[in-house]
Amino acid sequence: MWLILLLVMLFLPIMASVKVKTTFAKYSTVRNARGLTADQVARQILDSNGLYNVGIERIPGNLSDHYDPQANVVRLSESVYGQTSVAAIGVAAHECGHACQHAEEYTPIKIRTSLVPVTNFCSKFWYFAFILGYLISIEFVWAGIIMFGAVVLFQLVTLPVEFDASGRALKTLERDCILDSDEIGGAKKVLTAAAMTYVTALVVSIIQLLRLLASTRRR
């Protein structure tokens, strides 16, 4: 049983990553009918939501796109910024969705933001606490498990944030006629593939958490 779960933990993230890359690559070759670039679309979406103060920057890398709430900037990767593909526009619109979430104080993203400091600490030190538990005391084992549980909680809260951002993106692209009806399908496939990486990460972490809990029975 655990061997099967271990294989799932190994191969599921790989499959999700391949799916994102291949889907993005496929729709990166599909140019939108209006000839808009992803950064132009991002600016249009932000302005239409009254977010004139949110900047847009180009950053190096591939699919390293994100919204930085501290700098109040939507950062688009080289594979997205200035590109006219359906895939690039979908990604840019998704990141603008996050900017809108912060502006509206969307509850799940407020919870997620509040968990960031704790999650950063727990993700770095849960394993050390868990190992100390086998060397010193069972209390450290449970401390490690609780810390890892905080990481799982963070991933769980992340899901509605990501799905909502994608939902906002697709709704805006269709409502404002940024993409044609047939192009919306391509953008949706790109964003769905990206969202599944978060689902996969949560599934893998839950399996790991169960393995950690099961290990306490052997002590």
Image (tube, rainbow, N blue to C red):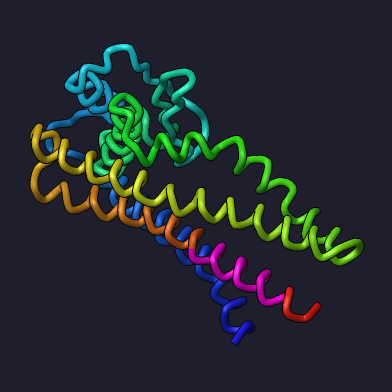
Q: Which residues are magenta?
A: 203-215
**Foreground residue among 185 and 130:** 130
Q: What residue is shown at x 45% (from left), y 54% (from top)?
A: 156
Q: Is residue 162 left or right of residue 213?
A: left
**Foreground residue among 107 and 64:** 107
Q: Position of residue 124 (x, y in %)?
A: 71, 46
User: Which of the image's four quarters has the N terminus?
Assistant: bottom right
Q: What residue is shown at x 13% (from left), y 34% (from top)?
A: 178
**Foreground residue among 21 and 105:** 105
Q: Is residue 184 magenta?
A: no
Is residue 83 visible to us here?
no
Q: With respect to residue 139, does 65 lie above or below?
A: above
Q: With respect to residue 202, does 90 lie above or below?
A: above
Q: With respect to residue 9, does 22 lie above or below?
A: above
Q: Is residue 83 left or right of residue 210?
A: left
Is residue 177 visible to us here?
yes
User: Which of the image's four quarters has the C terminus?
Assistant: bottom right
Q: Quadrant of residue 43?
A: top left
Identify the main secondary structure in magenta. Answer: helix
**Foreground residue among 2 and 48:** 2
Q: Position of residue 108 (x, y in %)?
A: 37, 41
Q: Position of residue 206 (x, y in %)?
A: 54, 66
Q: Is residue 204 magenta?
A: yes
Q: Residue furthest top?
A: 53
